[in-house]
Amino acid sequence: MRFSSSALLGSALLIGQGLCNSNPENKPRAIPTPRWDTPTVPNDLQAFSIEFAFFPDYAGNKSHPNEFSKNLLTNFKTLTGVPPTVRVGGDHSYYHPDQKENVELIYANPNNDQPDTIYYGPAFFESYHTLGNVKFFHGLNLNQNRSIQILQEAAIEACISIGPQLELFELGNEWNFAPGEYRTANYSMLDYVHEWNQKAAAVKAAVQKACPGHFPGFFAPSFALLNFIKSQWSAEDLFKLGYDPHNLIKELSFHNYMGVNEPPNNPPVDWDLQRLLMNHTSIQESLATQIQRAKNLAYLGHPYVLGELNSIANQGITGETNTFGDALWLVDFSFWAGAHNIKRLHFHQGLDYRYASWQPILGKGQPPTTRPPYYGQIMVASALGHSHNARVVNIPLNEETESAYAIYDGDRLSKLAIVNMQAFNETTTGTRPSKEYKFEVPGHYRQAKVESLIAPGSDATEEVTFAGISYDHDLAMGKPVVVDPKEKFVMIEDGVLRVDVPDSSAVVVSLN
């Protein structure tokens, strides 16, 4: 995506220590039950999008596989029972069937976050064989104009090399930027419809000939966040113009970011972290258009996914998107999206990106490391677990710095997720404030297990854990390591669950 415009707290539960915000009107909240039409949330809600140019850095190759990345992805299958889905795309890469190198990156300025031009050859596809049983979406360049034959050859190489792990193709990335950028200024949405339909049919014909059997289909239209660009293009109008007449699209994909990194116009990071990211109202506003669009396009019968998203576009902002506060944003964003029928969230990754969930190799002086957003993804995956019928219902709270969700396994209340996004910096002196939450739960429950997502503060970039577990690179190459073995439980009395959540932390409460 490119745009021009302290030590661990021993416990997240401070039960009976007198450190909670007193509120005489803090009555137990009733937990809403799912409506008949409340959607199920797939186990693989948490997914990834990896910038095409940097996929070899994340995955490695057959001789030098990236075990760190493989371990981090495997953790999701352990927690949910299904492997994560990885989209490889996000740019305009040119396939050269005679190229010996796996990828060649051309930078206008070596300090830029992304190359201006990417060339890749058949060796690139080795990287698809290093990450285990992962499902892949492979991006094809709609702008590869030398000949349709080259586009077909790229698709054929993908279907042969990736094999059964190839879930879908993506033909074109953020093509609503095309007028005046990749095409003439008067290039219309109807022009796009004709071009996409023609090239999609050509890809299908070539793939079915080279790889007989079921054609994977497409993930489309992969439009950029429409609220941030001046465009008359409408996803709803797209299909009225005859887009995808042969029903080759299997999933609807759109992109979403909360804001854009545009120095020197960026606001102060501490202020923006609380105002924009650690803010439930801001999250609701960001997703409102996506939720409405999903309803508008429901008649097509395709799952609606965010095929590329993250917090701040243009690779994030140091001190804001690489902090623990970003992880709390990710948790609230994910549950709100899942509760409103958005089926999968492909969080975008790239080498040295300031919002990345992990740094896969040494780059620009930054060693391989697991970053705070990864822990937010782990919390969401853990909360959904292995249920094949998970449903998420928002529990309305009073403040825009907090959110709560009930997680049902079918019709049975299974878990609660609570996010306290009130900022607390790790350099703050004194006792860390905490807030008590009280909920009415079915009377047969007697106790609950509490697993905390916590760090020294919202501005922290290290010492993050979920459920006392670290996934740090230096401990075990991304495998789970228990660093706080003490399990935490609360008793349920008279049908009331009470749990304290420190500022800048979140919990998953499992009812037993």
Image: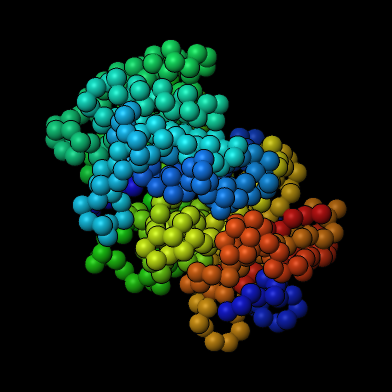
* Residue 211 shown left or right of residue 73 in the figure: left
Question: Looking at the image, which residue is at 29% across and 66% down?
Answer: 266
Horizontally, residue 457 falls left or right of residue 92, namely right
Image location (x, y in percent) of residue 276: 41, 62
- Give 194 or 211, whichever is nearer the viewer: 211
Residue 77 in picture, x, y percent from top left: 65, 43
| Relative vertical location of residue 38 with respect to residue 98 in this rendering, above or below | below
Q: Residue furthest bottom?
A: 430
Furthest-left residue in view? 185
Numbered disc total:
0
Q: Residue at x 43, y 45 (%)?
A: 56
Residue at 52 percent of width and 78 percent of height: 426
Viewer-closest of 267 and 61:
61
In front here: 85 or 302? 85
Residue 385 image offset from top left, x and y in percent: 68, 46
Q: Report whether 214 appears left or right of 41.
A: left
Q: Does residue 375 appear in the picture of this structure?
A: yes
| Left or right relative to 425: residue 141 | left
Quadrant assignment for the C terminus: bottom right
Q: Position of residue 386 (x, y in %)?
A: 70, 42
Q: State whether residue 244 is above or below residue 326.
A: above
The residue that appears at 14% across and 33% down in the rendered structure is: 184
| One can see residue 236 in this view | no
Colour theme: rainbow
